[in-house]
Amino acid sequence: MLQGHKSSEFVISAVVTVARDTLSKLGSTVFKEEVVTAFMQAFEDAPANQELTNLFRLHKAASGS
């Protein structure tokens, strides 16, 4: 055990800490316009499933919109 944790928990914790530090130092990620366009097209083309429909109904009810 390392620092009171199982080895796998220790490694995951260390990796998450380093990843967060790295991402915070980078500030932001910039994607090429064609990548954003392709992502948004795929998102818009995806059919709404029942879970997504329920989520939007819940949001509408909670926000009073």
Image (spheres, rainbow, N blue to C red):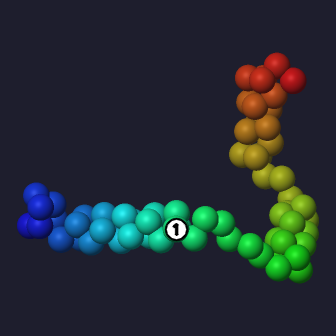
How far across and how far down the image is residue 31, in percent? Answer: 77, 75
Residue 49 to residue 63: above or below? below
Residue that label 1 marks: 25
How far across and how far down the image is residue 62, in percent? Answer: 73, 23
Q: Secondary structure at mark 1?
A: helix
Q: Nearer the viewer, residue 65 or 54?
A: 65
Q: Residue at x 12, y 61 (%)?
A: 3
Residue 12 to residue 50: above or below? below
Q: Nearer the viewer, residue 41 or 11?
A: 11
The quadrant of the picture occupied by the N terminus is: bottom left
Q: Residue at x 47, y 71 (%)?
A: 22
How far across and how far down the image is residue 59, in percent? Answer: 75, 31
How far across and how far down the image is residue 25, in percent? Answer: 52, 68
Looking at the image, residue 18 sits to the left or right of residue 61; the answer is: left
Residue 51 to residue 59: above or below? below
Mark yes or no: residue 34 visible.
yes
Mark yes or no: residue 38 visible.
no
Q: Residue at x 88, y 76 (%)?
A: 33
Residue 34 to residue 45: above or below? below
Q: Nearer the viewer, residue 30 or 57?
A: 30
Q: Residue at x 81, y 28 (%)?
A: 60
The quadrant of the picture occupied by the C terminus is: top right
| Total numbered badges shown on the rendered structure | 1
Looking at the image, residue 2 sits to the left or right of residue 47; the answer is: left
- Disc 1 marks a residue whose amino acid type is Lys
The residue most toward the top is 64
Q: Decide: few, some or many residues near mark 1? Use Cα within 10 Å; few <14, some 14-19, many ≥20.
A: few
Q: Quadrant of residue 10?
A: bottom left
Looking at the image, residue 25 sits to the left or right of residue 55; the answer is: left
Q: Quadrant of residue 44?
A: bottom right
Q: Nearer the viewer, residue 2 or 8?
A: 2
